[in-house]
Amino acid sequence: MDISKLIANTNLDITSSYYLQIATLIKAKIVDGSLTVGEKLPAERELASLFKVSRTTAINAYRHLEKDGYVNIKNGSGTYVSDRYTLENRTNHEIPWPQLLKPYIQSSMTSLMSELMVSNVLADKISLDAGMPDPNYYPIDIFSKLHKDYLKALDPRDFGHIPIHGYEPLRHTITQLLGSEGIKCHSDEVIILSGSQQGLYLTARALIEPGDYVIIQTPTYLGAIQVFQALGARILCLPQREDFPLEILEDYLARYRPKLLYCIPTFRNPNGAVITTGERKRLIQLAARYRLAILEDDPYSNFYYEDVPPTSLKSLDNYGGVIYLSTFSKTLMPGLRLGYMAAHPSLINRIILEKQYIDLHSNNISQWLLDLFIKNGYLEKHLIKMRGIYRNRRNVMADALNSGLKSKLSFHAPQGGFYIWCRINENISSKKLLQEALKMGVSFVPGEAFYATTGEDKEFRLCFSQHDEKVILEGISRLEKAIGKLKKDPFSTSKKEIRPII
């Protein structure tokens, strides 16, 4: 939890002790459940910065809370919300929920995505973090017109329950769409999902048992790492390098016999990498030889800014092992909550069984409108427009980084997608930089989020799709100031690990 959100617009009264006011405020957030048992609170120095008081005042506030049993101060670790208050004030009739919940594998980045979604609503912050399209270009007016023009012709039964695998006209439309991209499939090989994240989760649920091996590229999408970890998979990582490490993959296949390879072949999140056509063909040959299932996540291939990217792995699939997953959250708007999967009918049938336990079926009105949107030719027009907009924003961000931070950061402008992946050349960690950047009013995602194992904390991801050129330039300017501030700060090279607050 970012405590700065909880104390926004809080002004301390100069007529009473600052440390008591801070302690009272934090106590109130613990009592009302905003701060939960076991949650780590900001370090004293950061708390002092949030309230614009001395570090001694912050220390005294925490000591006061500790004396009253609201927090535990662990030397060398930090300050945590105590469970003593909860235990002492619980009635005999309350259900002990923490004891009833089954164990959950939780990494330090588990809450990162939800925190990013919340942080994006803060008006005074420039969010270069969450990978979302620009809300100013959501085609809401077109969807509104389609709804108005076609509503009377809609069969009332379409407002009721529909088949779990989706609205039949949309499934047929997507089959045609995939065919135009070289993926030959029938409608019984396609299922409509409530976003591609659901497809990722359902596929893992259908295939992975605790202890099974799963291969991922590093770095890769945080949501995939979380799903595999939560299901107890043992994750094997392909290292980051210019080419696709086929020889390491083959060693993993022979040594561990993994069930699944998860990859984003085209403009990978977070670094924009692309698997070449030749590597894709050799990957398919290798996967077929070892009967390896491949989950191909493809949210970004429509956003290319140079040459058209290589054809998908699914279009090369000659052994029925590629599971193709895509979404309309990136191409149109996340609020549609629609994605789709194309795979072997045996897997689709199992996914249908798994999906019925989740939501019975995805939103049928959204599916109806999306089908009309595609059939009326609006999708391709929208993609052409957005490619031009995002290409320019990528160029502006890359130029700004080159202009102000060339010696301090290393990066490559991607040929497509939403992100620029940066590496810090200074003796500064990305988490420390994030803390300073937040004070300047700009945010990004630290590189740690995209790795299944801990490593060097020198990388971070910037997203250029959400904001116009003016805001991007201001965001990079603030980032430059944050790096400059840390270079002058003697504490910037501290080895002490600090949890990012985003």
Image: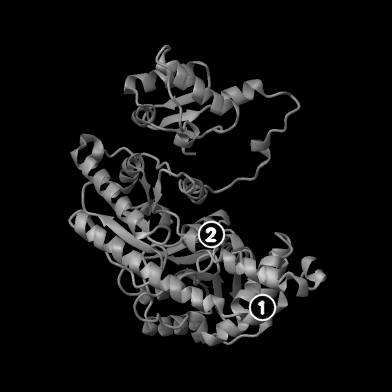
Q: What kind of element bears circle 2?
A: helix
User: In x, y percent, where is residue 247?
Assistant: 36, 76
Picture quarter with the C terminus = top left
Distance of label 1 from label 2 (alpha carbons): 28 Å
Image point (52%, 55%), residue name: 226
In front of the other: 275 or 347: 275
Name the residue located 56 percent from the left edge and 54 percent from the top edge.
Answer: 230
> Residue tagged by mark 1?
171
The mark found on residue 228 in the picture is 2
Judge whether residue 301 can be spotted in this image: no
Residue 308 location (% of width, % of height):
39, 81
Front tag of 1 and 2: 1
Q: Is residue 181 above or below residue 238?
A: below
User: Residue 401 is drawn in which quadrant?
Assistant: bottom left
Give, as a three-letter code, the residue at label 2. Phe
Q: How would you rate the neighbour count of disc 1 (Cα within 10 Å): few for under 14, some for 14-19, many for 20 or more?
A: many
SS under mark 1: helix
The image quadrant that residue 50 belongs to is top left
Q: Earlier in the sequence, mark 1 or mark 2?
A: 1
Q: Please give left or right for residue 458 compared with residue 123 in the image.
A: left
Whether residues under marks 1 and 2 lie with C-beta atoms below 8 angstroms apart, the answer is: no
